[in-house]
Image: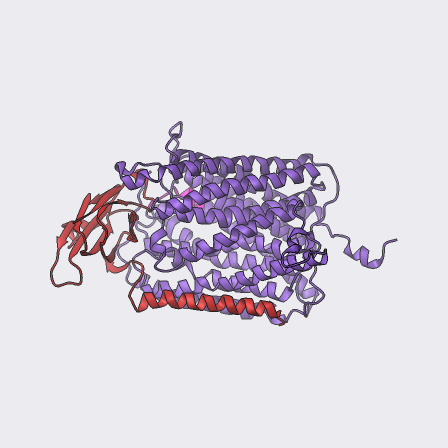
Chain colours: A red, B purple
Amino acid sequence: MHIHKYEKWWLTFGISSLVLFLFIVGFSAFHYGSHPPTGKVYIDPERVDEIVPFNNPGVHKVEGKEWDYEVVLVASAFYYNPPEIEVPLGSTVKFIATTKDVVHGFQIVGTNINMILEPGYVSEYVTTVDKSGEFLILCNEYCGIGHSTMTSMLKVVE
Amino acid sequence: MTTIKEKAKEFTKVDRRDGKLALAHIYVAFIALFIGGLCGLLQVLVRSGKFTLPWGIGYYQVLTVHGVLLGLILTTYFILGFQIAAMSRTSGTFTNKQRSLGWIGFWIMTTGTIAAATMVLLNEASVLYTFYAPLQAHWIFYVGMALVVVGSWIVGLAKIMKYREWRKVHPGESSPLLSFMVIVNMAMWIICSLGVAVEVVFQLIPWSLGWVDKVDVLLSRTLFWYFGHPLVYFWLLPAYMVWYVVIPKIIGGKIFSDALARLSFMLFLLFSIPVGFHHQLTEPGIESFWKFLQVVLTMMVVIPSLLTAFSMFATFELRGRQLGGKGLFGWVKKLPWKDARFAVPFIGMAAFIPAGAGGIINASHQMNQLIHNTIWVTGHFHLTVATTVVLTFFGASYWLLPHLTGRVLTKQMNKLAIIQAIVWTVGMSIMSGAMHIVGLMGAPRRSDFSTYGGAEQATDWIPYQIAQAVGGTILFVGIILILYIVVNLLFFAPKGETEFPVGEVSENAEKTPMWLENWKIWLTICIALILFAYTVPVIDMIQNAPPGSKGYKFW
């Protein structure tokens, strides 16, 4: 099949850029471990309140782990428990969250913490909070009539 | 005196009976545009915080109507109608049997549409067009959606039969380019809609009828997005057909390369399907490795997109220079900017540059976290489908409708069509621009107006939400204009003959190699890629499934 000379140049340039781009994305994913949030823990969505750690939602200081705090969070229509999260500036925090009913979102506005909470699964994300202030937490996955009133607040204090 | 060559060039007309079938689809499409567009207007007004819906109508009910009617009904019906006309024009009139199949499919789809719409209007199905299990709609809604899909397969079957018939009569020849593209488009639709059909028929219908108590949520979402991403390419490919085949003829030029056009369509078929995980990047239950793999496959569509961009601009430049355009960009001025059939789709093409760039951001593994489920995404697809695709469909309507109704597009209507496209561009720039910016600031998509408990961050969003309402209102004016033109072309425009423009391949282009039309090869690669991308994670999902979810009705 005949391909015009200029088109060959164009495709070579384009495909090279694409390869470089994918290499950068892949390098930061697999070398630096920068993956989008995921989770491979399973849970019975109807028994969330009885199961550790979700029987005790809140902010917990932990020792001997790669993170300083664990934020255990349970979402249900149309609430987050705990309703407010407070962590010290500069700490490394692991968010551990699930839902008791339908799919909910967990987005902390102004950060890249953004994950979907699905019944039966535990979503996890580890990050270092390096900005102080109040950050709105909201549900960004449609969950019903009260969807846009489902909020919480992350307070990063000095 | 007419020479034989001139006589051969006389345009072929779509048979009246085929035209009726195509028009039936197009009627439904434009009715959907009106109702869906009206719902869009209501949404942007509500989201501005200055307006509340009367008579107890719910925001999410309106949102469901908007998404289903514009995302599924307008697009699918217009595309099927356009394809029927394109097949009939390039491969010949449908046989009675094929045409009957087309009508059967049309009525099955329309029955499904009415059934689903009724349940949405009764507020029994405010689950948005992505279904969102374990939110549970009335079973009639799911059955309606299943009928839409099944009906579309039957319409597709009629086209596949026509194509096979053509190939049988012309052994060893490449099929007409436009017919070939219709079949690729249809193959993509059938392969991808199998996913949503499995979801609806085997998961959602039995569950909503109470035959089973629980639904596997992650599996349902995975099946949906296996369909949901190729769906957007299903919308886009007919626009590409217009760009590749029709526009060259309208501007008086030639198709740059038949072979490259076919290659790019096949690449779209391969790389649009095994990529659904990039809609699920922030979801639990899927290994990061498989997400990344599908991100890589997603990005492969950059290659056929580059091929397309090159072919388009090569056609434009060659024609502009032929008309005497000098210098590096002198040829641009020579293009027929006052012809709506060219200018309107051209705006659509131009919009695809920022739209494509936004798409790369969305699918970029980690970067997705910044914008996932924010209104940035809404801004993105209002550029892709609601500008690129829709403006191309409008541009195509300006010759397709009068061709089918035996009328002509008058000078005034042509002028109005260009004004319509400008109104659309202004409205969309404001609305989509505001959505992109406020999305980066964190504002979520698919959300009713809220002050979020007076949070300071959410207060900053309000000016942009007002801008969305301004842009959305201008767009609604655009919808009124296009409907005015469409009604004119259907019922009032002067009688006459309008060409269905089909471009010819440049005499410099080489013969198209036959392997480009070897379906055994391409379908094998297509299925192999799907199996490669999905087998392991889906088996994992099923084997390690958590207890399922019962249904909820939270609206």
Q: Position of residue B354 (x, y in %)?
A: 48, 52
Q: State the residue in front, B545 or B257.
A: B257
Above-or-below relation of A124 to B57: below
Tell me: A131 left or right of B77. left
* Residues drawn in magenta: B135-143
Q: Is residue B292 shown to the viewer in this render?
A: yes
Tell me: B95 left or right of B357. right
Q: In this figure, what is the number of numbered marks?
A: 0
In the rendered structure, does residue A33 fall within the stretch colored magenta? no
In the rendered structure, does residue B138 fall within the stretch colored magenta? yes
Please tell me which residue is depicted at 65% across the width and 39% down the height of the picture: B415
Tell me: A119 left or right of B413. left
Q: Quadrant of the C terminus of chain B?
A: top left
Q: Based on the displayed image, in which of its 4 quarters is residue B8 positioned?
A: bottom right
Q: Based on the displayed image, in which of its 4 quarters is residue B515 positioned?
A: bottom right
Tell me: B409 left or right of B276. right
Q: Position of residue A104 (x, y in %)?
A: 29, 47
Q: State the residue in front, B188 or B485.
A: B485
Q: Is residue B274 shown to the viewer in this render?
A: no
